[in-house]
Amino acid sequence: MYDLIILGCGPAGEKAAAQAAFFGKRVAVIDPGPIGGACVHTGTLPSKSLREAALVLSGARALDLSAVQVAVDRRARLADLLAHKDAVTAAEQARMERNLQRHGVTLLLGRGRLAGAHAVAYSPRDGGPEQLLQAEVVLIATGTHPFRPDGLPFAHPRVWDSDEVVEMDRLPATLLVYGAGVIGCEYASIFAALGVAVTLVEPRDAILGFLDAAVTDALLGAFADAGIEVLKEHRLGAVQADDDGISLSLQGPDGEITRRYEQLLFAAGRSGNTAGIGLETVGLQPNRRGLLEVDARYHTGAAQIYAVGDVIGFPALASTSMEQGRIAVCHAFDFPYKKELATLLPYGIYTIPEVSMVGESSASLAAAGRDFEIGVARFADNARAHLHGDAAGLLQLVFCPQTRKLLGVHIVGQGASELVHIGMMAIQLGGTIDGFIDAVFNFPTLSELYKYAAYDGLGRLARQG
């Protein structure tokens, strides 16, 4: 008998297990293995590993070292890039295993499915007999897989989904990425940095529409500089794959066009891993994308069954999934600890250049009828950015003109996902842009951008006044 059985050991499952075990509960985690989920093996870490390798190759060329011979081959063997990815994922998997062991969590490799309100059927990976396990609470953290629409020849090696791309055996010369969401934009920029001719196609009329317009414009400008062709309002039509490449049609505002590429990456959405886990035994029904609905406590509405992570949909970030796992078990066992997710959530998009944001945007404040002002600092005016050889990008502060209270931070450029946390803490503590002006920052640093964005904001206020 366990207090908690968790289906799935990605970021959400691991942190939930450790949290419950920390408070003395007997916990088992069932996962097909290797543990880590899409985050470790096919998504977050593998894609970021490839990104870092691409940055090394493209970054060396960006530095103006006219008197130095830089011995970097942008056509570095793909095996070397993938070896870096494999090393990173292996290290994270080992860390997770150590964490479970340290907390006394039982790891069961194999398949698990609900067999009633407090029962889970466990089929060991080694082919042993199925076991019926009992638990007070069951937590579903099974994650997602790439959405595959009917009609696309995914069985052909010329067609990838967003999980398969990290197992590629060669770099194509030309690539069409369909779907300009976070995953599509990240891979488009990574492949472009590796010398691939990339076309990025989005069926909607906006790219990453949740970003501030200034950030989107800067990102699209960087994409253009990298040679990425962006086609908005184009839908994928017929696709034919052969040994030499992909022939496809795109339906756009001006009619149909036909193209040919060496490879197609379909990156338009993901679906929940809920098939075959016994939801029907407790009366649960996922939505059309296989996702589960939960309440504020991450309870599914059935018995003592909770769900967290990507399998419940938005925001589907590793960072939020970890917190959801912790919060769910605190509610399930009434631990006097975390009971709600922070309302201020940072978003990181690991394109080249990087994008990150937190808090309000000019669009969200305008829609709410609230006054706001902005302050902008550009990487081109920052010494550290030039030292890195990457002076493209901007940092934008959004603040209240009456109180100068910081409301949002939007960054595109090198280190954006790290820099954003400075602004996040300022917002969380109720800070104003004056705090950045009064502070002393190391020189040269990218963090100085906050000071000069604040000065720009004050200048805008003065010109109004």
Image: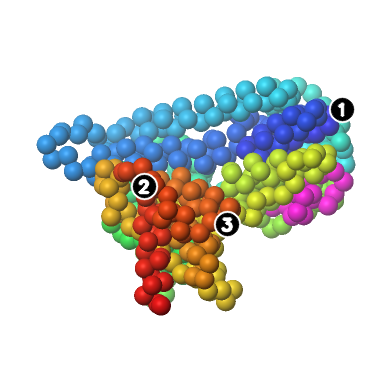
374 to 130, vertically: above or below: below
Badge 1 local density, few (<14 within 10 Å), some, or many (20+)?
some
Q: Secondary structure at mark 1?
A: loop
Question: Gap between marks 1 and 2, in whole Å?
Answer: 53 Å
* Residue 446's disc number: 2
Quadrant placement of the C terminus: bottom left
Q: Secondary structure at mark 2?
A: loop
The stretch in magenta equals 290-307
Quadrant of residue 218 in the image? Answer: bottom left
The residue drawn where x is 66% and y is 34% is: 14
Q: Is residue 450 left or right of residue 125?
A: left
Q: Secondary structure at mark 3?
A: loop
Q: How many marks?
A: 3
Q: Main secondary structure of the magenta part?
A: loop
The residue drawn where x is 73% and y is 43% is: 338
Badge 3 local density, few (<14 within 10 Å), some, or many (20+)?
few
Residue 125 in percent (x, y) is at 69, 26
Residue type beneath disc 1: Met
Residue 285 visible in rendering: yes
Residue type beneath disc 2: Leu
Query: Which residue position holds label 3?
Result: 430
Query: Which residue position holds label 1?
Result: 1
* Residue 355's disc number: none
